[in-house]
Image (cartoon, coloured by chain):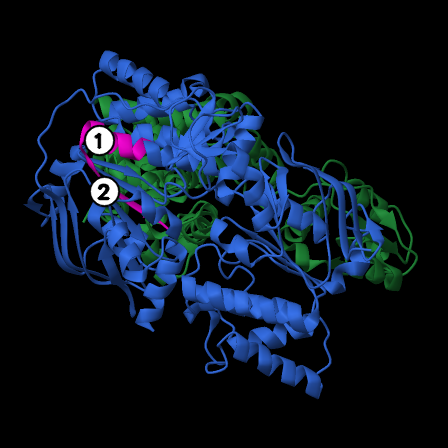
Amino acid sequence: MALLEVDSVHIAYKRTIAVKEASFTADAGQIVGFIGADGAGKSSLFHAIAGVLHFRGEIRYKGYPYHSPKEAEPIKPYIGLMPQGLGLVLYPQLSVEEHLEFFANIRDIPRDKAFMKYKKKLLHMAGLAEFPDRLAKNLSGGMKQKLSLICTLIHKPKLLILDEPTTGVDPLSRQELWEILDQNRKEERSLTLFSTAYMGEAAKMDKIHLMDEGEIIAQGTAGELIKSARPYTYQATRCKECITFNGRTYSLKPLSAPHAEPTLESLFFINALKKGKIPPPVEVLPRETPIDIPEVVMEAKGLTKRFGDFVADDHIDMQLRRGEILGLLGANGAGKTTFIKMLLGLYPIDEGELYLLGRKIQSPKDRQELKRYIGYMSQNFALYKDLTIRENLFYFANMHQLPLNKASERIERLAKSLGFWDYMDSFPKDVPMGINQRFSLAAAILHEPVVLFLDEPTSGVDTIARAQFWQLLHKLKHIWGISILVTTHYMSEAQYCDRVVVLRRGKKIADASPKELERRFGTKDFEEVFLRLYEEQE
Amino acid sequence: MRSFWTVMAKEFLSFLRSWGLVAVVLYSFTLDVYIAGQGIEVKPRNVRVGYVIEGGGVLPQKILSHLHAPEFQKPKWFASQKELQKAIFNKEILVGLIFGHDFEKNIDSHKGAKLDVLLDATAASQAYITLVYLQNTLLRLENIHIPLKLKIHKLFNQNADSHMFISFAEMLSVITMIGIILTAAVFVKEKEDGTWDIMLLMPVDSRLVILAKAASQIAIVMGGILICVGFVLLGVFHVPINGSFLAFMLLSLLYAFTIAGIGLFIAAASHTIMEVAQLSVLIMMPLIFLSGAWTPIYSMHPILQKLSVISPLRYYIEGSESIFFRGTGWSDLYPYFMGVSVLGILTFWYGYRKIGRLF
């Protein structure tokens, strides 16, 4: 009998279905992964298993069945849940040591020698043994996640449920988190459920479940899954009823092109093909207003931003050239958003010089004049939730002083070419994230800017929407000739950029093209590249 | 100008689409003012009286017969003083009367009779007014004839109707509360959603955007004032308008502008709607208490009297009460207009510096 059996679990919120008939089994000593984009249903499924969410269907833990949070009460002592979000279970004003004491207290663990020994071991594993007195608010993102993890481990749970513990965490800390998990599975023989949006972590898992729109679309080991995708994966070619992305073409019907080696991402494309959900083609039409662009669009010299004692960006030099996609990469808290906000003038610059479109920025007046050349898309696609997509776009068009007939023409053109024309009269909350993403891009390029600043445009959208979005950015670059600065915490997205700058704790640690980085570290796996980059810094 | 109207239109649309907010605003300007006007009473009402008669006679019953509805409930008989005290202790009775053994005899023989009164002073004002009421009743019984008569002229409010004032004061508090929260929320909602950053990057002067956003909320508040004055103050409580209604609307507009400035100030200092709620209460309470809405300024501590100068509500209350009840003319209203405007300009200037500019 398996330790955990999940039998057609179905979770629905008011109008949306979060999880559709999910079933799987898992054994003690395994690390079982759930990979999928935000909104794929991973968190809902985890919360149902942890007994904190109502669901339909049955879950059995060691043969003990439960159908509701109330019935799950007796097994809660054996469960450890770490919810999504950096340091969400921590209390900013408590120290590392106090956290462990607190979590031991609420679990009512006796303070015997064994406990003291275990606590010491956990602190050591997490690399926190040296500063037990540091307050949680002063820990870095990676340390916070490690502390959260050992707090979850303090009562030695038999079923460990970790919801995106590595998202936004720097590569080194992620590796250390995995080491803790690996040790825990070997010594405690517990079952770990692990969700992530990073495909690269799949290799470390005993079994993987790919999730998309509330469904488990495939399960097996990484090897098995890739094997299952092989028959449908070809080298890039043109064809009907297929999807081409990043040098591979996926088709259900046999093609004459030679086969290519698939990745885990390939499975999402194949799943879309199987369901007949071929994403609508996305086009970029030529811009209406021609413009000549200087050779260097943006130049930052020693830009620095401090918040009190904390240096968010420490003397950063950067150049954005004409017609270039520059990726600004780093973990959460590395200083990416702060940097973009300094470029835009949303934060004052504490030190350093900034040139935009060949002009030195000295006063708010300079900003005022440059506004119409800059497009900006903020984190989480900031849009007005109580306006429909059409109203939103007209609002922005009005703010950009576009004449009304020209505006409506341009909005129609953009909506049709970016494939969200059918959703024009819906509210942003009612449409898929991918649509919101493209529509906020439309809002950002409505006035045909010269340079685009995109802050985490790909987080929270599914694999296919992400792939499409990157294609879109490349078309935009080619057809409009504009420069694009993109921030992301997906290291693997570095391969789509012309050049990447890597930030680590406010400092620039790399500035090179992806090719150069591949050559320097001898690997095509960017997760690996960044891990090495971070290691160099230690 | 086009951006100004676009922002205004967008804010109205957002407001009308959040029906919960519409309901709260409508409730505050109608039912809330009505309930306050009807419910908050300084007169005794339904006061529970208990009595003990140790002697006999008709006089105690005669006195008790004066305590009738709606001010008093039917007085309740108690067998002994001890029981009455217990009832007062248990909050069953507010006022206790004890007619002693020789009560009637002493009155008849003009020896100076004594009526013991027990008051539950935790309900101080009700108990105290009851006491005054009782004293008046007894005075009339005594039939003293002094060659002195009071001739009373009640100015501005002939029926001494407290409903009018309380509903009026409540409306002014509602304007303050709704004005602050609406304006602060409209900015902080954008901050929370991240749209404010995008707004700042639009090729439009952010002063214009701030003004348009504030103006939309001011318009909503002005609509609320019209509804409240029309339906509740004039319709239900028959508040007189002795001065110029136009002057009142203009003063209200200036006041709404000032309040929007305070809202902007709060928006600049907070990041989430929760913080807005907390800060609003912190700022609103002293604003209302210092204004003289519920306590006359001259009965405050001297330091608080000085502080009340910075409460825009003070000018608004004095100004609008003058217009409604005293019928003060335009030229004498000018200090109120000044006070409200100066404070408004200050708060707007600060708010703009804090949230409205690029660096």
- Name above or below for residue A356 compared with residue A476: below
- Rendered hue of chain B is green
The verdict on residue A246 being magenta is: no
According to the colouring, which chain is blue? Answer: A
Left or right side of B258 for B170 = right
- The image shows residue A32, relative to residue A126, as above or below, that is above
- Which region is colored magenta? A472-488
Chain of the residue displaying label 2: B
- Magenta-drawn stretch contains A477: yes
- Residue at position x 38%, y 20% from top? A390
| Amino acid type assigned to the residue bearing label 2 in the image | Ile
| Labels 2 and 1 positioned on one and the same chain | no
Spot occupied by residue B1 in the image (x, y as percentages of width and height): 20, 23
State whether residue B316 appears in this view: yes
Left or right, A52 with reference to B60: left
Crowd class of label 2 (few under 14; some 14 to 19; many from 20; radius 10 Å): some
- Residue at which label 1 appears: A478
